[in-house]
Image (cartoon, rainbow, N blue to C red):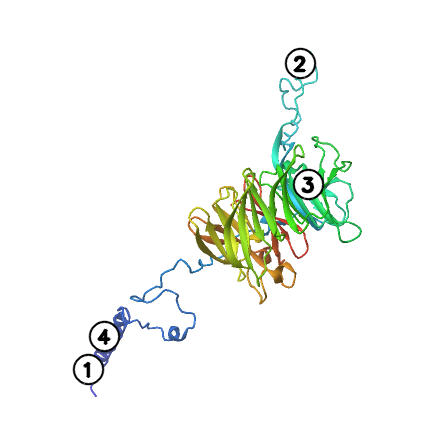
Amino acid sequence: MPRRNVILVLIVSTLVIGGLLAFLYYQSKKVPPESGEGTNFIARFNPFKSNVPPQGEDIPPVTETQPPAEIPPEETSPLKLKKISSVPIAGFGLFKKERFKEVAVPPPPAAGAPEVLGTTTDTKKAPLKKPTAPPTEFATAVRYIERATGNIYQTFVDKIEERKFSTTVIPKIYDAYWGSGGDMVVMRHLKPNGQTIETIVGTLPKEKLGEDLETNQIKAVFLTDDIRDISLSGDGTKIFYLISVNGGAFGTSMNIADGKKTQIFESAFTEWLSTYPNKNTVALTTKPSGVAVGYMYALDVAKKAFTRVLGPINGLTTLMSPDGKKVLYSNGALTLSLYTIATKESVPLGVRTLPEKCVWSNGNEVVYCAVPDQIPNGIYPDSWYQGEVSFRDKIWKINTEDGSAKIIADPTALVGEDIDSIKLALDADEYYLFFVNKKDSFLWEFDLRP
């Protein structure tokens, strides 16, 4: 073939190949049509598909009876959840306590620095200032009583430094309630015969700033033997207790300040559990069982009026709000619900737990609840009361006004310890949530602040 023809063939071949490559390149840049199919063939076999529903597919609406979506726990530090007590406790109380403020000490002046007027000890140059008392502040503190010995301990809640407050020995305290701003404690234990319930009202000495604590002694007053149930008013100024006489139950209200007692309740039925949400109202609920119906009543302390609130409900347990207008309650299935007394309306809150594992906020709108992540088969609340089952809780915050709910702490994830929470309480500022682990009776606190 002539040389000229060879050159022409090479030029034509080069142009054809270049054009083909250019065509393929620009075709790859085009957007495929919206067919719902991707161009990545591997992605078609990916089991981890998006949770977003396809266009045109309806999302089922949330109904009133549908439980709220479980919101993942907020990012929390293990330091927000702390074990307070070093010993198993029978009960605890919160109060405000004075302490010295921490004041930053200025560094000493550098060598050769000019003298500042008023800092010299030479009275001819400048008179010494009159010494002033160090500044103080009031902070939340907690007192608790050791189950084994009856010794009382205390610490500030923002800086855990456990110190013994008293050395009075009252062995084997099973239950304790605190009132009068932490200056009074009601202790319950069995007498040496192992049958008689003894109830002691202990008055603690006033603490002076900076004094040694361990020399304190408790002044004790003994109430009637075999008190079947006891509770303290929400403001910590009154005690309500029940005794059985001649097959009936009698309820007495006692002022802590002067010891004055007034009988305000009488019933032929003896199996009652009481709470005292405010000084005007005592809530009385029949002792619960999953195989028996239960009832709740409100007792007007001043009028001695007795009104049914709830029932009949199998396995009924209750917790009235501080203002006496709402009731948290659960049934034998541990379905937690909210009952509004004025409207007689009941609304499920979408979680399963017992009211005994909850606490009301001061505003009567929010509740903090310890909610089991699993509930084994059993008869409730009997199985839990009798210790046949134990729970592993997460802490929930529930708004009873709008029904919103979220997990705010998972103790197992935070500190690696399973906690079955009881005796929940909030400090006056609602900065901290406190509870006792039913598994071992140790006291814990959770910092609610952001």
Which x, y percent locates residue 442? 67, 51
Q: Is residue 74 visible?
A: no
Where does the N terminus fall, quadrant-wise?
Answer: bottom left
The image shows residue 166 at horizontal and vertical percentages of 75, 39
Distance (Cα) linking label 3 and label 2? 51 Å
The local secondary structure at tag 1 comes to helix
The percent position of residue 5, horizontal first and vertical second, equals 19, 83
Labels 3 and 2 touching (C-beta < 8 A): no
Depicted 73 relative to depicted 205: above or below: below
Q: Amino acid at mark 4?
A: Gly
Residue 19's tag is 4
Q: Which mark is residue 185?
A: 3
- Give the farthest residue toward the top: 124
Pointer 3 or 2: first along the chain: 2
Asked if one can make out residue 143 in the rendered structure from this viewpoint, the answer is yes
Q: Which residue is pictured at 42% across the width and 48% down the height?
A: 343
209 relative to 41, above or below = above
Residue mark closest to the camera, 3 vs 2: 3
Q: Amino acid at mark 1?
A: Arg
Distance, label 2 to label 1, CA atoms, is 116 Å
Instruction: For mark 2, give the secondary structure.
Output: loop
Front one among 348 and 101: 348
Q: Which residue is mark 2?
A: 127
Taking depth in this image into account, of 211 and 176 the one nearest to the observer is 176
Give me the disc on residue 4: 1
- Going from N to C along the chain, the mark reached first, 1 or 4, is 1
Q: What residue occupies the far right of the structure in this picture? A: 192
Label 4 close to label 3 by CB (< 8 Å): no
Which residue lies at the image location 59% right of the left edge and 57% below the top edge?
288
Label 1 CA crowd tier, 10 Å (few <14, some 14–19, many 20+): few
Q: Earlier in the sequence, mark 2 or mark 4?
A: 4
The image quarter in which residue 56 lies:
bottom left
